[in-house]
Amino acid sequence: MIYIFKLKFNMPYGFRVGGTKQESNLLEALYQIDEQGSIYYLIPFSSWKGVFRRVTEMLVNSQSHFNNHSVSEDRVNQIYTVYSSSIEECVKNITDCDNDVVKVAIAKGIISKNDRSHDKKTEFAKLVEMWNCPVEKIYGSEYFAGSITISDSIVYSGVLSRTHAVIDRKSKKVLERHLYTEHIVDVNSVNVNLILRDYIKEWLDTLRFMANVGTFIGGSKSRGIGYIKLDTKESEFAEVRDITAKPVFKPLSDLL
C-alpha cells in the first residue's frame, strides 16, 4: 500500500532553518530567489526527515537502534544460521532469489560466493537488524533506501529581526562585541507533502505525537522558535491502490 500525505503544521513562533552567517553578527534563515526575483524561505526535505526520524526513534525506543544495531557473536551466528539456506540459493541464482534482505546483501557485496568471512557475516547480521527496524525501514540506512519521500517546504513571507547578546556561561555576563541579529521567518503555518510505502503503524504513531504534543524544527529551539504542531483537520491523506486512478484525499483526522 502507498500513502500520500499533505500535512499542515501550525507554527505560532516562526522558524529559522539552516542559513548562513553572512556577517559576524547576522544569522539568516535559508532562502532562495525564484525566477521573478522574489525571495522565498526554505525548509529542505532533509530537515523534515530529521524531525520525523527523531520523533519515530523516541516512540519506537529500540535499544538495538540506539546501539547502531551492533550485534553480539551469538546473534551473528544465529542470524546467519537462519538465512544460510536462502544465501546459498540466492548466490547460485540471484534472479530466482525471493528473499529481499539477501538480495540487498548480494547487491552491496556483503554476501558473495568467494567471501564468507567473519567480518562479512557480522555485516550481514547488522543489515538484517536494520532491515527489521521500523526506523531504518521508514527513513533509510547505509544499506538501503527508506520507504518515505518528503518534499521541501517553500514559504513566501517576511522576516522578523531579533537582536541577542551572547552570555558567558561562567560569569553570567554579556560578552563584549557579542551582539548578533537573528532573522526569524514570520509565518503561522507551513505545509509539507510526503509519500509513504508501508510501515504505516509507526508512521501514524509519529503523526499522533506531532498532533498531540508537537516538536521543533530549525534553530533557536531554546527560545521556542520553530515549534510545530500538526493540524489534523487541515491535513489530508490518500491511499493509492491503483497507480492509474486519481488519489482521493480525506481529512487526516479520519486516519488518526
Image (tube, rainbow, N blue to C red):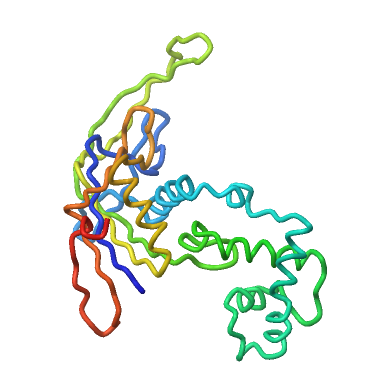
253 vs 108, left or right, is left
The residue drawn where x is 32% and y is 39% is: 213
Quarter of the picture holding the N terminus: bottom left
Residue 33 screen position, x and y as percent: 27, 54
Classify 156 as above or below 122: above
Occupied quadrant, residue 246: bottom left
Occupied quadrant, residue 133: bottom right
Classify 243 as above or below 16: below
Residue 168 screen position, x and y as percent: 49, 15
Nearer to us in this view, 60 or 172 = 60
The residue drawn where x is 37% and y is 33% is: 221
Nearer to us in this view, 241 or 105 = 241
The residue drawn where x is 33% and y is 40% is: 16
Numbered label tally: 0
Classify 211 as above or below 104: above
Residue 22 screen position, x and y as percent: 39, 38
160 vs 29, left or right, is left
Residue 44 screen position, x and y as percent: 36, 54
The residue drawn where x is 42% and y is 47% is: 55
Quarter of the picture holding the C terminus: bottom left
Classify 240 as above or below 202: below
